Image (cartoon, rainbow, N blue to C red):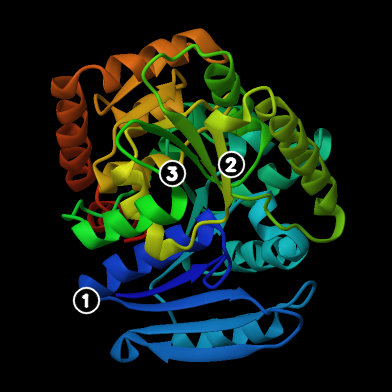
């Protein structure tokens, strides 16, 4: 089968770009040919071929123009087109992305649109964001990655019925043993060890970083040595800089809160991909104290790393993590601290969570997710 994936693509430091890349890798392993069409960086259209010719990446989508992208798609002549969609991910290329969706929806090509942020973005821009989602998601088969995301899509798009929206897992890489040298390297680089708590990901108010910092500085946990906050504010452009300002203001609030007990909170900034799995596996607990989410790329990576996870009790996180995490009420630093102590103080529970995470990574592998999405386009 010939597959086009339209949306963010590496080297963009973006969870959606990473998700697209892993889906493409799984599809190639299954014998499919993949063309990734993504945005032209700084107006420069580029192309490259990798994976022995089974994968082509064309960075040709302009801010407003779609001509090059359409030509590449026509020449490739795919059996199915998958659009990885979120308003924040499309950013300054939102108009051209929507134009491509409209053009594809009017053609006879099979179109699958994956919705990554409908629950969070559906009302962020008021009526405008609702109009955007209705425009984008009613032109092909829709895929979501959690039950509450499906509810959000059906609410945003009254024309869609339950059968129009498919629910699949977000996807994980299957857990592999992590090299002890890698563990030692990240332990030294990031000051993380078996009694540390790790909070990983782009800085954003919905991530609840302030809640885990409060739990640490207020000493709601007795057994955690310290908290490592790994991540940075996402770079945004154009009108989306407004979202970036909110992220920066949140980061400043978190930093000020940490000063109540600076000896127990470390900030290490952006973590390169080569360090992420070892970092997740080495920490005693990975905290996901989110206040609003439908799915989490960090949760998927934690499963792959066989990490011990404590997470907010949100439907999207429960769907993605299953029995491989302890869940606490949203926004409760005391309950979060108690759950962290429960994991750190019980080696048997810790090992059970790690084994469950590894098992779930195989059940929700990118291979299976890729098959499910392609079946929808068949």
Q: Residue at x 36, y 62 (%)?
A: 23
Could one spot residue 157 in this view of the protein? no
Q: Residue at x 33, y 30 (%)?
A: 195
Q: Position of residue 90 (x, y in %)?
A: 67, 59
Q: Which residue is mark 1?
A: 31
* Vertical arrangement, residue 228 with respect to residue 136, above or below: above
Query: Which one is in front in this view, the residue at disc 2 or the one at disc 1?
Result: 2
Q: Name the spot of residue 200 as percent of width and height, x first.
A: 49, 43
Residue behind mark 2: 117
Residue with the mark numbered 3 = 298
Mark 2 vs mark 1, CA separation in Å:
30 Å
| Lateral position of residue 358 relative to residue 43, left or right | left
The image quadrant that residue 324 belongs to is top left
Residue 202 vertical position relative to residue 89 in the rendered view, above or below = above
Give how far across and how far down residue 318 sits, in percent. 37, 24
Look at 74% across and 34% down and name the residue there: 250
Q: Is residue 282 left or right of residue 177?
A: right
Element assignment for label 1 = loop
Label 3 element class: helix
Q: Nearer the viewer, mark 3 or mark 2?
A: 3
Query: Mark 3 or mark 1, which has the lower sequence index?
Result: 1
- Looking at the image, residue 312 sits to the left or right of residue 86; the answer is left
Q: Is residue 253 visible?
A: yes
Q: CA distance from mark 3 to mark 2?
A: 15 Å
Q: How many marks?
A: 3
Q: Quadrant of residue 34?
A: bottom left
- Quadrant of res 338: top left
Query: Do labels 2 and 1 touch, CB within 8 Å?
Result: no
SS category of the residue bearing label 2: loop
Quadrant that contains the C terminus: bottom left
Looking at the image, residue 42 sits to the left or right of residue 139; the answer is right
């Amino acid at each position: 089968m010939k597959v086009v994936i339209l949306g963010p693509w590496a080297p963009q430091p973006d969870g959606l770009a990473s998700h697209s890349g892993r889906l493409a890798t799984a599809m190639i392993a299954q014998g499919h040919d993949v063309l990734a069409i993504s945005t032209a960086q700084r107006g420069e259209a580029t192309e490259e071929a990798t994976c022995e010719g089974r994968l082509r990446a064309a960075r040709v989508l302009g801010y407003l123009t779609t001509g090059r992208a359409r030509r590449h798609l026509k020449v490739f002549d795919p059996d199915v087109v998958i659009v990885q969609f979120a308003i924040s991910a499309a950013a300054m290329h939102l108009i051209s992305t929507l134009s491509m969706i409209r053009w594809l929806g009017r053609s006879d090509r099979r179109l699958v649109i994956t919705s990554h942020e409908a629950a969070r973005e559906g009302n962020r821009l008021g009526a405008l964001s609702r109009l955007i989602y209705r425009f984008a998601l009613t032109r092909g088969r829709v895929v979501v990655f959690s039950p509450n995301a499906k509810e959000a899509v059906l609410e945003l798009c009254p024309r869609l019925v339950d059968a129009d929206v498919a629910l699949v897992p977000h996807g994980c890489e299957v857990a592999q043993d992590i090299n002890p040298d890698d563990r030692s390297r990240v332990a030294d680089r990031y000051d993380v060890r078996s009694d540390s708590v790790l909070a990983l990901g782009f800085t954003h108010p919905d991530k609840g970083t302030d809640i885990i910092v409060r739990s640490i500085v207020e000493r709601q946990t007795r057994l955690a040595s310290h908290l490592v906050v790994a991540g940075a504010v996402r770079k945004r452009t154009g009108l989306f800089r407004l979202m970036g300002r909110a992220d920066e203001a949140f980061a400043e609030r978190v930093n000020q809160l940490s000063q109540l007990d600076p000896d127990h909170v470390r900030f290490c900034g952006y973590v390169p991909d080569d360090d992420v799995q070892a970092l997740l596996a080495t920490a005693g607990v990975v905290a996901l104290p989110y206040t609003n989410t439908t799915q989490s790329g960090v949760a998927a990576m934690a499963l792959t790393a066989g990490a011990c996870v404590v997470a907010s009790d949100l439907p999207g996180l429960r769907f993605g993590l299953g029995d491989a995490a302890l869940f606490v009420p949203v926004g409760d630093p005391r309950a979060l601290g108690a759950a962290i102590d429960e994991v750190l103080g019980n080696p048997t529970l810790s090992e059970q969570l790690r084994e469950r995470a590894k098992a779930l990574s195989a059940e929700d592998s990118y291979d299976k997710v890729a098959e499910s999405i392609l079946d929808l386009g068949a």
